[in-house]
Amino acid sequence: MDIRNLLYRPTEAEKSAVDEVLGPPDSGWDGGSFGGLDGRVAYGGHAAREKRHMLLPALHAVQDAVGGVSRGALGYISDRLTVPPAEAYGVATFYALYGVDETGITTIHVCDDIICTQYGAEALCDSLDDALGSNGVRWERSPCLGQCDRAPAAMLHQPGKGYANAAPVDTRSVRAIGFDELDPGVVHQDRSELALLRRVGDVDPESLESYRASGGYETLSRAVDLGPMGVIEELERSNLRGRGGAAFPIGVKWRGVAEAPGPIKYVIANGDESEPGTFKDRLLMEGDPFAVVEAMTIYGFATGATHGYVYVRGEYPTAERRLTRAISQAREAGLLGADVAGSGFDFKLEVRRGAGAYICGEETALFASIEGHRGEPRQKPPFPTQHGLFGKPTGINNIETLLAALYALQIGGVPFSALGTEQSSGPKLFCVSGAVDRPGVYEVPFGATLGELLELSGAGKIGAVLLGGAAGSFVGPEAMSMPLTFEATRAAGATLGSGAVIVFDDDTDFGPVLARIARFFRDESCGQCVPCRIGTVRQEEALGRLSGGRPLGSRQEERKRLDDLARVMTDASICGLGQTAASAIQSAIRLGLPGAPQ
Amino acid sequence: MTTTDRQRVTISASVDGKTVELPEGSSVLDACRSAGVGLPTLCYGPTMTPASACRVCVVELEGSRALIPSCSRELEEGMEIRTGTDRAEHSRRLVLELLGSASELDRSEEQLAGWMTMAGARSERFGPPAVEAPRQPPSPGHHGSPELAAAATVYEPAKVEDELYVRDYSRCILCYRCVDACGVEHQNTFAIAVAGRGFDSRISTEFDFALPDSACVYCGNCIAVCPTGALVGKIEYDMREQGAWDESSQEITRTVCSYCGVGCNLDLHTQDNRIVKVTSPHDHDVTLGNLCIKGRFGWSYVGSGVDG
Ligand SMILES: Cc1cc2nc3c(=O)[nH]c(=O)nc-3n(C[C@H](O)[C@H](O)[C@H](O)COP(=O)(O)O)c2cc1C
Ligand code: SF4
Ligand code: SF4
Ligand code: SF4
Ligand code: FES
Ligand code: FES
């Protein structure tokens, strides 16, 4: 590969930020000074490809140190990793959290998504230009920040310090966001009766001892006794299905990875959680990080993977920090590393940070992101269990799925399968937000009805509920008796999706809500395939014309256009983003919600 | 399997009810073609690995919820493929309409107009094309309010940066062919990549530098694979802008490049006895359509003795 290096040089601060994550350069070929044999030997090929996965960590390092990715920094990173500058630029400009070709910027990301707007986010945004002035501080609108239980939310990024969440914020407090960490969030139910949330807010998330005192790591010992196949059979008996949206049986997936040929396999915990209205995985990662580490260790043990990743959404700095700390404590205690808990099993786990891209929650886009590429999904098949991260067999599960698996192994597969319904077993987390008295994460056995869930959280007169977030669908007040199970929602033409339950009261104008959803998909499409890249643009335009009362041609023609777009996006897109980009809007139209196009 | 019994395995499947048999490793597209069904393809070029990005080749597969891209899906035993269903035709038409609503396609490969007509694609139904201000630097996750009365396009002024080659990205459909040609598939130069996200994605050098300031070596192999005329030689671009480009009057003369010993075949395209473009045949087993700067652009000496 011919690589032409950029002529811009990094500053000392940029160089040391990069060297901190990559180590010092080996030679003149990767950004060091030329000398010795460098003129006669070159590095490339395999050695170079092996470093590319460090591209996002290196970009994060300069973004955090100096508040942007300058030409010199990008050039230095390209040299260090032997990545062509055009490609590094293509990657950096894919992710919303990198400020490319700038430095020294402090950014306040203000959520203007469909829950925060119910709590005054628009008025907050309107006040910000005056409130913030300009002195190197900029504010930007952001999609859901995963803090919807305490809306409206904001996030600060400050050079030299990194990210900090704040919620709720107002015009005054948004100017003074500090770096004190927020609590994970209130658990409104009696913890002693819960399975997945029982430790959140109870154990000290920074202490392995505290986790162990509450029964932590007993399940790993049990797993080691069961052996890899024993673990998988137990999970098969549990009937546990994935909580990340696709409801795929965990036993099938784990067995698929375990039985895939080849010595190198990976396991991944998907903590990218960017579906608007979803914050359950944040609670678990922030409040119970050791459980994620324990579950991942068992995942590796059962499937034969020796390397695992936890991919955490870039907007979740507390989760990232606590998981990193939990991993290092576990390693020191011999619960990770060469000989896990004396079992002879060798397992390495590391945290990777996303950088502002909803699409990176899609499993194949997530692989691309860890590999140091743009987060573009790829066509399946081949499926990840055969051809996943770095082309190797890979198991990937949602954070909640992993904690549910830990619970299933703790109580046994058969007792787990007896919870909930036949097709939807176990406990389930729902993120209730919007027009309710007590927004938060609720744990109920599968089968509880929507009405029962909303009673727990205290809802008033309801206009509609959006199940599953932007990629989900609206249901009306008549759905209160619907059991929240995979099968019952499917039969009703809805979905549980990510577990988001967004409540709108009965005087909501859904016009702006649908417009925000259309904008979300237009912004978050990776841009790879035509139905989604252009379809999401045309959908936003047609919707805007209809709600503004200025249709192109007749209203019927405009409606036909929207329907045609929905159909091609659903039928012909590469991945689930495009396939669901019309779902919420179409459901609002079908229900005839006020403000939806008629 | 030992080497002696490694005879080619045949896969049998059905296309629109007709049984087809093809060697293992064939694509669904190959199967459709062998059943006599022509399907449009845009991101899949004959010499390249399919990107599965444009979705203009989608067909229905029994048992699959979504449509599948025929170009990249490997044929499997017993597949039941349907190409002419309402669903499949609807998606292929919409993809063509959407592409035409966002990019200028009037200088595209000849077949495209035929596919558009056959599918009954009407791009104008999405509104008159918006002509936007020069492009802003990428800002993933953010975009301005839509114009509504006009359809957003990928418009940007043509990049005329040197005497050899023009990048007219208002015609780009983001098929990834040029990126793959410049990168892993052919050239291994990696001068260009996709930058930005979503509808604002563009083919770009680092920081959108002009081509002469990038890693580009002017092999023109990206021009050779671009299906829409977004990448084009400067002479062809100028002639087209002046309305002087007339493909029907052009002659193609096959010769061998005289610069080095590799022996690349050259096709000299001449109009009014003047070379207007040089290509290499895609099916040539040495070049696969690729050349270097000398073969592709180094011919201004030809004829210099004649015209003076
Ligand atoms: C656009 C898109 C975004 C997604 N985001 C997430 C996510 O943030 N977290 C997650 O666990 N799964 C997400 N998924 C689903 C994953 O692709 C994958 O199915 C899941 O991680 C598998 O885990 P599970 O089997 O435990 O559910 C997303 C899918 C799509 C199409
Ligand atoms: S459906 Fe959208 S997000 Fe998914 S691959 Fe296609 S363009 Fe990208
Ligand atoms: S001319 Fe050659 S080197 Fe330049 S961008 Fe095109 S393919 Fe790459
Ligand atoms: S410039 Fe041409 S080859 Fe490159 S992506 Fe655009 S249309 Fe395809
Ligand atoms: S944090 Fe604002 S909508 Fe979720
Ligand atoms: S030609 Fe098949 S997806 Fe583009």
Image (cartoon, rainbow, N blue to C red):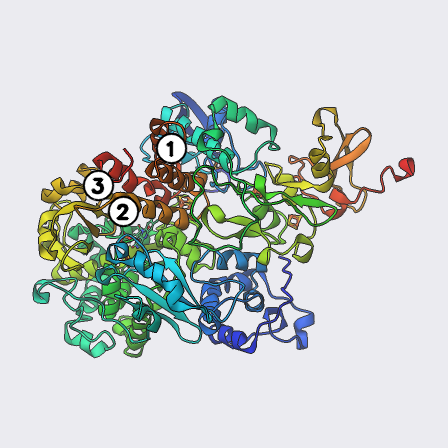
Q: Quadrant of residue B172?
A: top right
Q: Quadrant of residue A415?
A: bottom left
Residue A551 has which mark? 1
Q: Position of residue A80 (x, y in %)?
A: 56, 68
Instruction: Please say whether residue A440 is visible from this viewpoint.
Output: yes
The quarter in which the N terminus of chain A is drawn is: bottom right
Q: Secondary structure at mark 3?
A: loop
| Image height of B277 relative to A35, above or below | above
Instruction: Tell me which label, 1 or 3, sits earlier in the chain.
Output: 3
In the figure, is residue A356 to the left or right of A113?
right
The three-letter amino acid code for the residue at tag 2 is Ala
User: Disc 3 marks which residue?
Assistant: A494
**10 Å crowding of disc 3: few (<14), some (14-19), many (20+):** many
The answer for which chain carries disc 3 is: A
Q: Are marks 2 and 3 in contact (CB under 8 Å)?
A: no
Residue occupying image coordinates x 28% and y 64%: A296
Q: Are marks 1 and 3 in contact (CB under 8 Å)?
A: no
Q: CA distance from mark 2 to mark 3?
A: 13 Å
The three-letter amino acid code for the residue at tag 1 is Pro
The three-letter amino acid code for the residue at tag 3 is Ala
Instruction: Tell me which label, 2 or 1, sits earlier in the chain.
Output: 2
In the figure, is residue A505 to the left or right of A8?
left
Residue A246 has which mark? 2
